[in-house]
Image: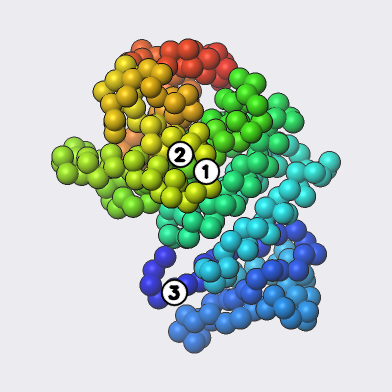
Amino acid sequence: MSEENGLYRPINLENISKGSNLTFDVYYESKSVGGTYVKFASADNPRHQEKVKEFLGNPDFNIQLYIEEKDLFKYYDQTTVSLKKMMESDVVPLKEKTKKVYSVSKEIMQDFFEFSATDKVLGSSEKVMEIMEDCISDNNVGFKAISQITNKDYYTYTHSVNVGLYCMTFGVKLKMGRDDVRELGLGGMLHDVGKAEVPHDLINKNGALTDEEFKIIQNHSPKGEEYLSNLNCYSQKVTCMAGQHHEKWKGGGYPKNLMGDQIAVNARICKIMDVYDALSTRRSYKKAMNSFEALTLMKQKMNDHFDPKLLNAFIRLMGPDM
Ligand SMILES: [Fe+2]
Ligand SMILES: [Fe+2]
């Protein structure tokens, strides 16, 4: 976010259930006063809240509203409550539900990676992952359905959510316990948090990297693990996924050059989903592969990178011609 926009962030009020009172103040941008933000509604003013309800119920009223960045976690708290309500609805189709959870997860990770939101928003990603786990487990959602909702343009934030969902679906299909599945999904979503420290130009650089640049990029893995560990709210099953997802089954990966079962199972799963998503999304300099092409390349050219049992299970679960 540019400096003149200060500490205000655009929000998507469609995520909030109609009829709700907002738990935070909202603002609009006043062009006439040189781009300053003017309060649209206070959380503690009943008259303002009536105005918000009208706004939420009227499809023609589409002014972009903003929130103070410090309140962002309140917006996501309210969003996740609304999301939960939507999940319980009998009239909303399953695909719409999964799409909505995906889009909220994307928003959270985008705030984190691109707008340097505080780590408080990551707490919301945990709640959203719980909702997604309920949805995938209860409805037996498979890779095919998940692939249809994932964004195929590569950004660090879409990649993070995609990897989280693939990891979660894999855990469900392998019949892991529900808590394990949630941690696997969450760890997948957070595996690249260390990239928040890497300059965008470097992440998107097409072409040979200097040794120095390569080191900076490689550092995202141990940095991410350290960052998550310091938050003191994630188990090792989650943090190891950030720290070990670039290790390779037969050695030669980074940061520690671990091998085989020295690498935690969750990190071995994350590695497969990480590469799969990178291959099956498009970037400015490369096309997206379809799932068959991606899996063939992983099996034939990168076999040493992955735990063979897990890779075979993934290929089996994806189906040959998805
Ligand atoms: Fe990574
Ligand atoms: Fe990644």
Q: Which three-letter amino acid code belongs to the residue tagged 1? A: Tyr
Horizontal and vertical percent for residue 295? 44, 19
Q: Earlier in the sequence, mark 3 or mark 1?
A: 3
**Mark 2, secondary structure of its residue:** helix
Indicate which disc, 2 or 1, sits on the residue closer to the N terminus. Answer: 1
* Quadrant placement of the C terminus: top right
Disc 1 residue lies near ligand 1 with CB under 8 A: no
Task: Identify the mark at residue 6; answer none if there is no mark.
Answer: 3
Judge from the rendering whether residue 313 lies leftward or rightward of residue 173; answer left or right: left
Asked if disc 2 and disc 1 are in contact, CB closer than 8 Å, the reply is: yes
**Disc 3 to disc 1, C-alpha distance:** 31 Å
Residue at image position (35%, 39%) is: 221
Instruction: Give amino acid for label 3.
Output: Gly
Image coordinates for residue 257, horizontal then vertical, percent: 28, 26
Disc number for residue 43: none
Q: Secondary structure at mark 3?
A: loop
Tags 3 and 1 touching, CB below 8 Å: no
- In the rendered view, does 127 fall on the left or right side of 266? right
Q: Give above or below for 301 relative to 104.
A: above
Q: Vertically, is 16 above or below 103? A: below
Residue receiving disc 1: 234
The quadrant of the rendering that contains the N terminus is: bottom left
Badge 3 residue CB within 8 Å of ligand 2: no
Q: Is residue 302 above or below residue 210?
A: above
Which residue in the rendered view is the most extreme toward the right?
90
* Position of residue 208 measured from the top left corner of the image (x, y, whole percent): 18, 37
The span from disc 3 to disc 2 (Cα, nearest Å) is 32 Å
The label shown at residue 239 is 2
